[in-house]
Amino acid sequence: MTDSERIVPDEETLDPPDWEKFRTLAHRMVDDMVTFLQTVRERPAWRPVPGEVARRFDAPLPQEGIGAEAAYEEFREIVLPYPMGNVHPRFWGWVSGTGTPFGMMAEMLAAGMNPNVKGYQHSASLVEAQVISWCKEMFSFPETASGLLVSGGSMANLVGLAVARNACARGEVRRHGLQAYERSLTLYCSSETHSSIQKAIELLGLGDDALRRVPVDEDFRIDLEALGRMLAADRSHGAHPFCLIGNAGTVNTGAVDDLEALADLCAAEHLWFHVDGALGAMAYLSPRLRKRVAGLERADSLAFDMHKWLYMPYEVGCILVRREELHRAAFSLVPSYLATSDRGVASGSAWFADYGPQLSRGFRSLKVWLSIKEHGIEKYARLVEQNVAQASYVAAAMEASPDLELLAPVALNVVAFRFRTPELEEAEVDALNREILHRLHESGEAVPSQTVVEGRVALRIAITNHRSRRSDFDRFVAEVIRVGRQLVATGKHRSARTAQVPGQRR
Amino acid sequence: MTDSERIVPDEETLDPPDWEKFRTLAHRMVDDMVTFLQTVRERPAWRPVPGEVARRFDAPLPQEGIGAEAAYEEFREIVLPYPMGNVHPRFWGWVSGTGTPFGMMAEMLAAGMNPNVKGYQHSASLVEAQVISWCKEMFSFPETASGLLVSGGSMANLVGLAVARNACARGEVRRHGLQAYERSLTLYCSSETHSSIQKAIELLGLGDDALRRVPVDEDFRIDLEALGRMLAADRSHGAHPFCLIGNAGTVNTGAVDDLEALADLCAAEHLWFHVDGALGAMAYLSPRLRKRVAGLERADSLAFDMHKWLYMPYEVGCILVRREELHRAAFSLVPSYLATSDRGVASGSAWFADYGPQLSRGFRSLKVWLSIKEHGIEKYARLVEQNVAQASYVAAAMEASPDLELLAPVALNVVAFRFRTPELEEAEVDALNREILHRLHESGEAVPSQTVVEGRVALRIAITNHRSRRSDFDRFVAEVIRVGRQLVATGKHRSARTAQVPGQRR
């Protein structure tokens, strides 16, 4: 019996009215997208959305459908031509993942199977569990550790700090709330720590006051002596320090805290050691770079992103927790013995929803599983090394130029720099560098982003791009110099508008 | 200049070594997945993962890659044949979305463009903003309201309640934490409320004690008199009630609280009105069903899922907040005037990261945008009506059978029932129904799930499936009766294992 014979006349479906026509469309979509990626280098790194295109997005909720073909034509016309640009070889703005063609197709496979990966007995749960195991291997975590795939670094930090809060409070906080505490709970991190930590602390009800920002040294690493003094002072004032957050790669400069020293301190002071590795954890994959982030494998909880420096399509991040029972205790709503059935769909040992805030969960592990099988983790390690080498290469080129100035040491893959000229005052240099940034974006030549380093406007590139070549960086450095000199020569930097962008966007 | 000419010999990429070979593979993947969906009815609704297949997922982290073709072959061999089953026309377990073929392809397009939709000027931000506008239209929210696409209902509830907490505390909680409060903050919901609300309350640091569960009436709706008494008593004990949570569709029975009355009460008592519409909000789309969930459009914050009853692929949920400034105040870390640049990539008016916990955000709006254009919202409304009609149809068939018993009124699309026989004691009936459930799963005939209604084990179907036909329900009812009678006749129900499954899984 065919499908159509079963349909009661008045029953509808969202399946295609004509499967062969749909199949033809699907093939066209794949052709277009493979071509889109294959030819990305031929297009600008970014271009603005024209006003008449932007206005097309003001249309109200469609009452009647136009069919898959016509909907796809609109995508081709007004969506595909105006990407963010992070798939381009000269996009190094913020810390943006590049994605891969196979990762793109993996998302199609995942959406076709469309499982809910909260748990249950089906292949997606097994894929998910295996990817978590691989993550533990990647970062030398014990087999007994737990982990959860999440939407990204912000969520990974939130989950990790929720576990820390709960572990410190031995579960009381879940029942009685933070108001049951008399002593103020405090956490410690460097002043260079990413805003997602603050967001997590606030969401957890601890309050930003609880997040104690420790000054950094000249390499933008947490100042250990200052940390010790703050801990002692807070304790003497009756506070209850419970967690220390280390950075494996800060957002502004890519600095890595002395994670070994922080791990030692946490052991001595009975603090939870959380590491935010969203930016730099992947350096651990490389035998040559591992020492730069050594100590992250000693974290009680480690947050990292795979849509950044592991080049996976958005979204996928991960939190690892050394002690599984503490992870589960922070989120599970059912006692272990009730977690699953012993037979049927609800059987299966994994119950991911017990380890984080989501219940329904998509199949984000498939792209990771397929991609790591495709390339092997050693190739990812080589690409991480390649990006670090590119950062050193571009930094050397900048140091060799009298027009450019590095604003921070290059710890990993982030280069913060500016165009400088003795002719201008500091405020004018800031405006000049903002204008250079805008012109680079507007010409589509390259996409760095802006940050503020020690009060000075900096251009910044974070290289998490497997498509970038050394020649792209040669071209970029030459263009920054050309644009900067031209602006100074024509006095155009003075007309630069002075709108600020925040320094803390990752 | 071609791409290959630009590559420095020692530089690597994750792009395919041979684009035409990759293109061929991508077409094969699409063919396989279109066929997978086209033929889903011919396969069982579920089948267990054989032990020898499950063991394949124990392999350690791959060091070397095997290439895209071989990786895909593994997917075809051990992943694709063992789906969760929720794409099948006779899968009605928990509340699981079905997805669509066009939605599947939309995920491929999104992953190919791979934008970070935290904000910025590019087409994905415009798509996202338009989808949020459409969501406001769908639920009669004012244009001035704000919204955010999130991973699903759990996250939507978390964001909504975080805004409620912050609004009640006028922002103080973000800075000083909950410990700065002397009065205990309390929230109210019915005893039938989904566990994600408890999870959110606990994560927010309010503590489960703060969540006051109000008894329900015989229709499983919140008891308004009991609610009034609890509010008064809590206030007299010095508590600070700040939020009331209404259900538009409870997890166990699909019951809908009297949302109009709750909205009135919130206005009178100065409470934040949060509606959890993850299960039933979509009934609002239908002019015929709208009255059943009327009042949800008066919520201060409305949480709903689009991967459930709007049939989108996982993950996509949404939170709407009536007062944009309160939404932003709960999450934004930058003052408005610093939020974006005026030129370049960082320009653009939308900054989604200011409205929720995520900073990096994938392009989850594209599948919604394309699918609503494909079908028009009226077709979705008709499909919601179809599922509600199917629930009534199956309930009528059950009521007509002496072997079956409905355990709750059918408010929308959830039917909770059990096989009964006068020959057995209550405990034996529980075991019998569990055994029926397992046999339905194991045979692949259909996937209902289990819950507990008033202490009795219930089989439960939640119909959020655009592939189900009336004939599927005929077949299902007949099979439940056949299996039940056979078990009773052979005395096999007595050997049923008694493992429990929790009642609160959505």
Image (tube, coloured by chain):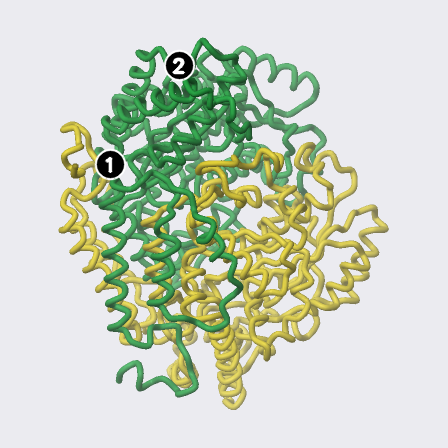
Chain colours: A green, B yellow
Q: Mark yes or no: residue B330 visible.
A: yes
Residue B484: assigned label: none
Q: Secondary structure at mark 1?
A: helix
Q: Position of residue B167 (x, y in %)?
A: 71, 45
- Residue identified by numbered label 1: A377
**Residue B152: image location, x then y, percent:** 50, 55
Please name whichever residue, A484 or B87, is drawn nearer the observer in this view of the structure. A484
- B403 lies above or below B11: below
Q: Label 1 sits on what residue type?
A: Ile
A413 or A237, which is in the foreground? A413
Residue B54 falls in image quadrant: bottom left
Image-based side of B459 in relation to A117, left or right: right
Q: Residue at x 64, y 45 (%)?
A: A175
Mark 1 or mark 2, whichever is nearer to me: 2
Q: Is residue A306 visible?
A: no
- Please give left or right for residue B23 compared with residue B86 in the image: left
Disc sitting over residue A405 in the figure: 2
Image height of A481 relative to A422, above or below: below
Q: Horizontally, is A144 left or right of B176 in the view? A: left
Residue at point 42% right, 74% down? B466
Front residue of this view, candidates A129 and B500: A129
Picture quarter containing residue B296? bottom right
Q: Residue furthest top?
A: A422
Give the mark nearer the N terminus: 1 vs 2. Answer: 1
Furthest toward the right, the residue is B236
Q: Chain of mark 1?
A: A
Q: Is residue A419 left or right of residue A496?
A: left
Task: Tell me if mark 2 has few (under 14), some (14-19) or many (20+) residues whose alpha carbon lies within 10 angstroms of its own.
Answer: some
Query: Whole-percent x and y of residue A198?
Result: 57, 32
The answer to whether marks 1 and 2 sit on the same chain is yes
Chain bearing tag 2 is A
